[in-house]
Image (cartoon, grey):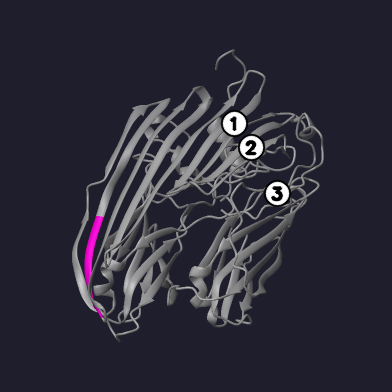
Amino acid sequence: MPGGGKVIDVRKLIILAAAGLVLTSAAPARAAGSSLAEPSAVTSGRAEPPAEFGSDWDDPRTAAPAIAKPATRSCTTTVVEHAFAGYDPYVSSYAPTCRGPWSKVVLRLDGNVKGRQYDRLGWLTIGGVEVFKTSTPEPSPDGITWSVEKDVTAYASLLKSPQAVRMYLGNTVDDTYTGVLNIKVSLTFYAGLARTADDVLPLADQGREGPDLTGTVRVAANTERLLAEVYATGSGGGCEEFWYLTAPSATGYSCPADPGPYREVQVLLDGEVAGIAAPFPHVYTGGWSNPFLWYVVPAPRAFDIRPISYDLTPYLGKLTDGAAHRVAVRVVGVPAGQSGWDTPINFLGWRDHGSARVTGGLLAARLSPLTNEVTGATGEVRTRGGHAFTATGYLRTSHGVRTSSVTQRVSNRSTHTWGTGENPDALDATWTDDATSVLGGKVTHLAQRFAVDGSITVGADNRLTTRMRMSDVRGPVTDTFTGEASWQLDVPRDQRHATATTQERYRIAGRYDKTIRTVNGTVL
């Protein structure tokens, strides 16, 4: 390590942080596992930011725009109101008390917590369908509030009838970790008309076959378009929470995975691959050994974990026979016997209302060979991976024979370097996910690019510093986080002397551009 000083295994520090064993001035430095409705523009009122973190900081927020809401009659119903202080799911029921039709449905989570607590990963299901997945901010001793909004109009057909509600947000509360997560989730319905899926279906007969999530789906006989959603997260602690930092076991790195860090989320129908996608490299609010980096502005998607979307329309000719068809969700690259991925899947179906049944077939499907090249030795690993998938099918519908096709291309390039004792520890990685669907001459294209350029270093003065740049590009939307945070190791909590500067810039090409900057927990 330049300049000498204590050698510390930074990778092991991250794992200890994931177990909540590395403490900071307000919370364990743990990685857990968006559209955030902004708090008031009024911040602390301080003329200057403090010289370092104290016992309180500004409430979490992001630079994303608020969800646009129509100027029509609205009605709100609460589906969750609970203090999460354990590991039992909250169970309630939903009743359609807001009269339709609806042009938009907006889910809103309002939360508050104070004291000491890790970040937590949670989910909400309605009628067995996962409609929202989130992680939580880490609190200050004095307390924080935050809110998240999500457009859930796509699930409107599910909300026309009574449904069971379940929310999970497992949380340890004891003499050390005192933060109780007080959560309220509401749905607001806006009057009007919207063309949404006719059917919203959960995975039936759910189980596991090795690491794969498995089950069945039975679609309506007149379904003419079918999408799947997978809320994929490497989570639950352990190395798969940091899958993008794993390295071949021969390198001696403390998070081993053979052949390396390449991961890919696949959907299989009746045993055959029907879709591929690159997972998003989520960083939660205790991530990279430094919660000070994320106290006010989280990493992209931390509070609203977006599902991966797959167009399964080319397969409908095989699925509309009235039978239950086998579904599996597989994460490619996970070492044998290793757990740590959560991959719930939903289905959205649109019907041909002019026919009782559509028929057709799959014309062609091709999965190109996977490139997964991992090179290097102790101290450096380079990865280059990816491949492509195409599928074409046809359907006989009431409006004629319609051909559908899907093309997906995914790739990952990364360079991971580390020093003695994994200090420093750095990653420079990029993922691309390019998907094109053609249905009846209508083309839908989404190009995505995710990037992480970060490092953790412990200096000769025993001060840990994390530097991070993350970007999330989805078509015209670019969400970029940059920041640096430091804190003192091996000292009493009131002597951490933590500091951080962060910035998030959220842009929608030609429509929106906003930046939030913070210094030591104060929004500038």
The alpha-carbon separation of the residues under discs 2 and 1 comes to 8 Å
Q: Residues within 10 Å of mark 2 (few under 14, many from 20)?
A: many
- Residue contact between numbered discs 2 and 3, judged by CB atoms under 8 Å: no
Residue at image point 51% right, 38% down? 470
Total marks shown come to: 3
- Residue contact between numbered discs 1 and 3, judged by CB atoms under 8 Å: no
Which of 346/515 is in front? 515
Q: Is residue 97 left or right of residue 415?
A: right
Q: Amino acid at mark 3?
A: Gln
Mark closer to the chain start, 1 or 3 = 3
Residue at image point 77% right, 44% down? 43
Boundaries of the magenta span: 390-397
Callout 1 secondary element: strand
Name the residue tied to disc 2. Answer: 293
Which of 412/83 is in front? 412
Q: Position of residue 138 (x, y in %)?
A: 68, 47
Name the residue tied to disc 1. Answer: 466
Name the residue tied to disc 3. Answer: 117
